[in-house]
Image (spheres, rainbow, N blue to C red):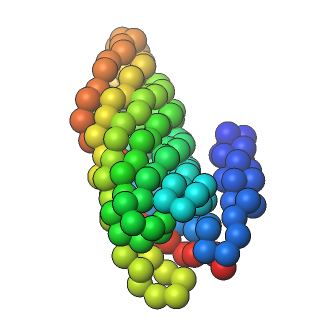
Amino acid sequence: MKKVIVLIGVLLCLSSVGSAQNWAVKTNLAYWATTTLNIGTEVALGQRLTLDVVGVYNPFTFSHNKKILCWGVQPELRWWMCRKFSGHFLGVHGHYGQYNGGIKTFRYDGWLAGAGLSYGYQWILGNRWNLETEIGVGYARLNYDKYLRTHCGKFIEHNARNYFGPTRFSISFSYMIK
């Protein structure tokens, strides 16, 4: 829980540098579909460059010890093809997080870190609201312990793995701070 408080503090500190139409607060509907709480902020660094930082947290355990407990942070540097907060953008993102969960036979407890490239598009919906879609591919290093998914499940093994594939997906609403 302490890490979540620190993450929210970092997001608020980043957001305090924003000014008229140079700062947005956002949330990703795709994360909400998996019961993952999330909030992000995007700050203009120049005419066509922004910094997007998203924090995610899922504290929920479901019936029969099914859970997707996790927290993570995903910073991204974005280059806008025309103007910031509107139209096409390309991004370079990183990700770090910890997880403890499983919904089938096993539970995985570990961490991941990596980076990737992304493409997205943002539509202006109104004076303060935008809709954004984004997809990204990249690399993640996963380091985890594997257990049976039962209460106090038996330890199976320690493992690490390299992952290449989709690393970012969003359908987000943004609120522009003026």
x 51%, y 55%: residue: 49
Q: Nearer the viewer, residue 24 or 55?
A: 24
For residue 148, above or below residue 79: above
| Residue 27 visible (yes or no) | no
Across the whole image, how many numbered discs are drawn on residues? 0
- Above or below, 56 against 88 in this view is above
Quadrant for the C terminus in the image: bottom right
Task: Indicate the position of residue 155 as horizontal and vertical percent values.
Answer: 40, 15
Residue sitting at x 39%, y 12%: 158
List x then y, in percent, for residue 46: 58, 57
Quadrant in the picture for residue 1: top right
Q: Residue at x 33, y 29 (%)?
A: 139
For residue 19, which quarter of the picture? bottom right
Q: Nearer the viewer, residue 54 or 59?
A: 54
Q: Residue at x 37, y 76 (%)?
A: 123
Asked if one can make out residue 43 in the rendered structure from this viewpoint, the answer is: yes
Looking at the image, which is closer to me, 2 or 133?
133
With 24 as the anchor, is 124 left or right in this view? left
Up-down: is 173 above or below 63? below
Q: Report x, y in % for residue 13.
A: 75, 53
Is 17 left or right of 44, judged from the image as shown?
right
Q: As drawn, is 126 to the left or to the right of 160?
A: right
The residue positioned farthest toward the bottom in the image shown: 126
Dividing the picture into quadrants, the one containing residue 142 is top left
